[in-house]
Image (cartoon, rainbow, N blue to C red):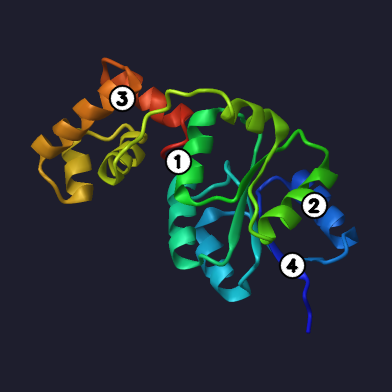
């Protein structure tokens, strides 16, 4: 019986895809079963290929990465999601952890490090680039959001009006204003513009 780890790569950068593919082909016990360049087709491909590990670039075309991770974790809990990113902002890292990712790899790492990360998460471990791990170990004041506040944040990142957010979530505008008031307090901003800028920096909404 084949015990190889099945890896699906989701990244829209040709050079990065080529480098990762070459490394995986040379790595014993790892099999690259597919490549996807858009988040729009990701769910269908995970369902078809059933990878053990998904290497997920945060900046691909498609739905917001946080939304993607939450959906994948719910529908395919046996697939470990290992995030690939050029950014070390801890706000999206923590949000992605809560959504169910198994690790976070910075793209400036030596590519061979990725093999170690894959082997760690497929055996149930959590893997972070050292720079991320050091910062995660430090005290933090990153806010905790309710599920509904997360819904509002993801729509707010598009610059949506209260009316549009209410329509999307099937709630009243009064309810939206209530959630926004709590969000503003948690992220320490005083205006809608500041809040929208924060959501984009934090990884909510479409990249």
Local SS, label 4: strand
Residue position marked by numbered label 1 in the rendering: 206
Q: Mark 3 or mark 2, which is nearer the start of the sequence?
A: 2
Q: CA distance from mark 1 to mark 4?
A: 30 Å
What is the x, y in percent for residue 199? 40, 30
Q: Is residue 116 above or below residue 194?
A: below
User: What residue is at 58 percent from the left and 46 percent from the top?
Assistant: 60
Work out whether mark 1 precedes mark 2 in sequence or the reverse, and give the earlier one: 2
Q: Nearer the viewer, mark 1 or mark 4?
A: 4
Circle 4 sits on which residue? Answer: 5
Q: CA distance from mark 4 to mark 2?
A: 11 Å
Q: Residues within 10 Å of mark 1 (few under 14, many from 20)?
A: some
Residue 120 position in % (x across, y down): 72, 53
Q: Which residue is mark 2?
A: 115
Residue at the spot 79% in from the left edge and 79% down from the top edge: 2
3D distance between C-alphas at marks 3 and 4? 41 Å
Q: Which residue is mark 3?
A: 186
Real-space CA distance between mark 2 and mark 3, rounded to the nearest whole angstrom: 38 Å
Q: In the rendered structure, which disc, 1 or 4, sits on the residue that comes first in sequence? A: 4
Q: What secondary structure is marked by label 2?
A: helix
For the residues bearing labels 3 and 4, Cβ distance under 8 angstroms: no
Q: Residue at x 77, y 47 (%)?
A: 114
Q: Which comes before the other along the chain, label 3 or label 1?
A: 3
Residue 175 relative to residue 148: left or right: left
- As measured in the structure, the alpha-carbon distance from the residue carrying label 1 to the one carrying label 2 is 29 Å
């Amino acid at each position: 019986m084949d015990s190889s780890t099945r890896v699906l790569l989701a990244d829209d950068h040709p050079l990065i895809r080529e480098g990762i593919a070459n490394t995986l082909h040379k790595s014993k016990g790892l099999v690259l079963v597919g490549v996807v360049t858009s988040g729009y087709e990701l769910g269908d491909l995970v369902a078809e290929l059933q990878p053990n590990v998904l290497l997920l670039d945060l900046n691909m075309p498609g739905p917001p990465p946080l939304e993607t991770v939450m959906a994948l974790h719910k529908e395919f809990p046996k697939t470990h999601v290992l995030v690939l990113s050029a950014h070390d902002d801890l706000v999206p890292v923590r949000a992605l952890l809560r959504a169910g990712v198994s690790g976070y790899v910075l793209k400036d790492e030596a590519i061979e490090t990725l093999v170690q990360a894959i082997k760690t998460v497929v055996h149930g471990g959590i893997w972070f680039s050292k720079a991320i791990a050091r910062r995660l170990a430090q005290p933090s004041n990153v806010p905790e959001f309710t599920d509904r506040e997360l819904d509002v944040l993801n729509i707010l990142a598009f610059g949506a009006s209260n009316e549009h957010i209410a329509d999307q979530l099937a709630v009243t505008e009064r309810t939206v204003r209530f959630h926004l008031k709590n969000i503003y307090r948690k992220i320490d901003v005083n205006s809608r513009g500041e809040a929208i800028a924060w959501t984009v920096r934090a990884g909510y909404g479409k990249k």
